[in-house]
Every structure is written in C-alpha cells, then in structure tokens.
Amino acid sequence: MGNLYHYYICTKCKGGQRHPINDVHESIENILSTISISAQTVNLYRKMLEKLFDKEDSMRKDEITKTEREIEKIQSRITSLQDQFMDKQIDPQDYHLMKQRVEKDLVGLSCKLKDLKDDKSPFKEYIKHTVPMLENLVSYYRKSDGNTKKKILSCIFSKKIVLEKSKVATYEFTTPIQVLLNAGKVCRGTKKKTRARK
C-alpha cells in the first residue's frame, strides 16, 4: 500500500497548484515566529508603554474636566438669558439671537465631550492581555486542531494567503498584528526610548 500525502490546494494559484501540508505549515510557523518575537519585545517595554498610555489618558481626562466646566458655564448663561428675558431686560429678538449662539456652542462642546469619553485607548488592554498570548504563538498553533488553526490564522491575516513553491508568498496582516509588529520594530531600534515615545 502506497504512502498517503496531504496537500493544500491554492485556489489563487494558476491551475490550483498542490502544496505539501508540512511545507506550508513550516512557512506559516516562520511568519508566526516573527509575531512572537515582536510580542516578546513589546512585553519587555510594557511598563514604559503603559506609562505613555497613562499619560495620554491623563491628558484626555483633564480635557474632559475642562470641557465639562465650559458646558456648565454655557448652561449658566442660558439660565441668565432666560432670567433677563423674563425680567424684560432684553427684547425678544436679542434674546433669540443670543440663545441661538449659546446653544450652538453647547452642542459643539457636548459633541466634543462625547468624543473624549469614547476615545479610550485599547492599546493598554491589548498589551496587558493579548501580547502575552502571542509570545507563545507558534507553540499554541502547533498544538491546535484544524479548526482552531483556522481561527488563529483568521485573526492574524486580513486576507487569504497565497502560496508559491509550497511557501506563503503573499499575505496581509490584520491591524492589531501590524500595530504589534511596528511597535516591536520601534522597541528594537537603536534609539529605543526616544523612538518608542514617539
């Protein structure tokens, strides 16, 4: 009885070329290995990066407080205008013009406040929880069954990979993975601290 060989068929290759499964897995594992190295590097600089995120968040919180105070001022102005109008200190036409202007400012500040409150950086949580998982990505991938491997790859690659000569020839990373790889390069750079801050 002959030996049984398993292949991947590349649907994007001409003629649906067959590629030995072991060769393809080795090529994918090489790519996953670069992700793991970047994750390990980023984890080494985790404390420094977290401080940067905390600083940015502190600035955001200060801006929230400032905007809330500005909103309170405008609300006080609206109340004051209403009082002056009721006391007949200003005529109806002036009242409506001033009210429109102040309410326009209020809408602008309310939108700004909403944006500031929604603008929480996901990177701190990403570094804390996701990056450590990616440090042992190759090992986890090897131990996984076919369905889990498929899920892992869908989180790593944003498009289907293209094979050539039993190796991954064309691929595109998802945004979180690309961010991690870029951060890893920065942390490994010669002027590490300065560049990481940037």
Image (tube, rainbow, N blue to C red):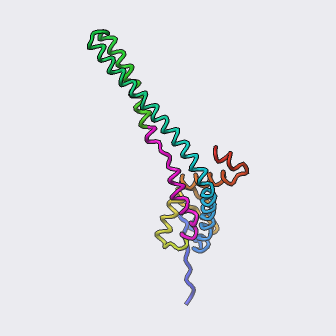
Relative placement, left or right, of 89 versus 115 is left
Residue 128 part of the magenta-drawn span: yes
User: Could you tell me which residue is drawn at 38 percent across and 21 percent down?
Assistant: 102
Above-or-below relation of 164 to 158 = below
User: Could you tell me which residue is drawn at 64 percent across and 45 percent down?
Assistant: 197
In the picture, the quarter occupied by the C terminus is top right
User: Could you tell me which residue is drawn at 58 percent across and 58 percent down?
Assistant: 171
Q: Farthest residue in the bottom direction? A: 1
In the picture, the quarter occupied by the N terminus is bottom right
Residue 177 part of the magenta-drawn span: no
- Residue stretch rendered in magenta on the structure: 115-140
Above-or-below relation of 155 to 192 = below
Closer-to-camera residue (104/56) = 56
Give the number of callouts. Answer: 0
Closer-to-camera residue (135/144) = 135
Relative placement, left or right, of 70 versus 15 is left
Q: Farthest residue in the left direction? A: 86
The percent position of residue 159, horizontal first and vertical second, equals 53, 57
The percent position of residue 162, horizontal first and vertical second, equals 58, 62
The percent position of residue 126, horizontal first and vertical second, equals 52, 54
Closer-to-camera residue (153/77) = 77
Q: Which image quadrant for residue 135? A: bottom right
Relative placement, left or right, of 18 versus 148 is right
User: Could you tell me which residue is drawn at 62 percent across and 52 percent down?
Assistant: 183
